[in-house]
Amino acid sequence: MDGTAEHRARGGFRSHEAGSVIVGWLVRVVIVVGLCGTVTVDLVSIGVAHLQAADDAQTVAADAERVMLSVRAGPGSDEVIRQRVRDAAVADGVSLRGTAVVVNPDGSVTCTVVRQARTLLFASLPVVGSWTQATSTDTAPAIHN
C-alpha cells in the first residue's frame, strides 16, 4: 500500500479534497443564512403591512368623521360622503386600492382597508400566502347635527 492509500485509510484527505469539503459546508451555510434572511424579511414585511392597514383604517375613519361634520344629510349625501372621504384619504397618503367606505343607516361610516405585504417568498406559498394580506376596519361614529 502506498502512502496515499494509507493516509486515506486513516481518514485523511488530500489538500484538494479538504478544500472541497470546506467549500461544500460554506455553500450550505450561505443557503441556510439566505433562507433565514428571506423568511425574516417576509415576516417583517407582513408585520408592517398589518400595522399600516390599522393606521390607514383609523386615518380614513377620522377623515370620515371630519367629512360628516361638513356634509348635510339628504338625497345623494352618502355618495358625497364616500367621495370626500376617498379624496381626504388620498390627501393623507392612504392608498385606497382595496378600501371600502360604507355609510351605515345609523349615519356612521365604516372604512375597511386591505393592504398587501410585499414579500419575497411567502406570497407564493399556499400555506402562508394568506398572511400577506392585511385587513383592518374602523368606524367613525354617527354625528347628529
Image (spheres, helix red, strand yellow):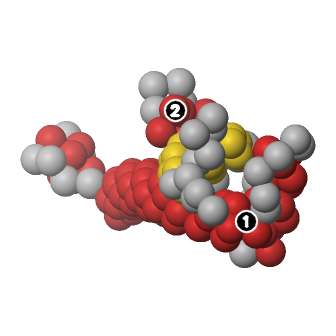
Q: Secondary structure at mark 1?
A: helix
Could you say which quadrant of the image residue 81 lies in?
bottom right
Q: Is residue 53 visible?
A: no
According to the picture, the residue beneath numbered tag 1 turns out to be 67
Q: Quadrant of the N terminus?
A: top left
Residue 17: % across, % down: 37, 54
For residue 29, side relative to residue 136 (left or right) = left
Image point 27% across, 54% down: which residue?
13
Residue type of the residue flagged with mark 1: Val
Residue 35: % across, % down: 44, 51
Q: CA distance from mark 2 to mark 1?
A: 33 Å
**Residue nearer the viewer, 11 or 21:** 21
Residue type of the residue flagged with mark 2: Ser
Could you say which quadrant of the image residue 121 lies in?
top right
Q: Quadrant of the C terminus?
A: bottom right
According to the picture, the residue beneath numbered tag 2 turns out to be 130
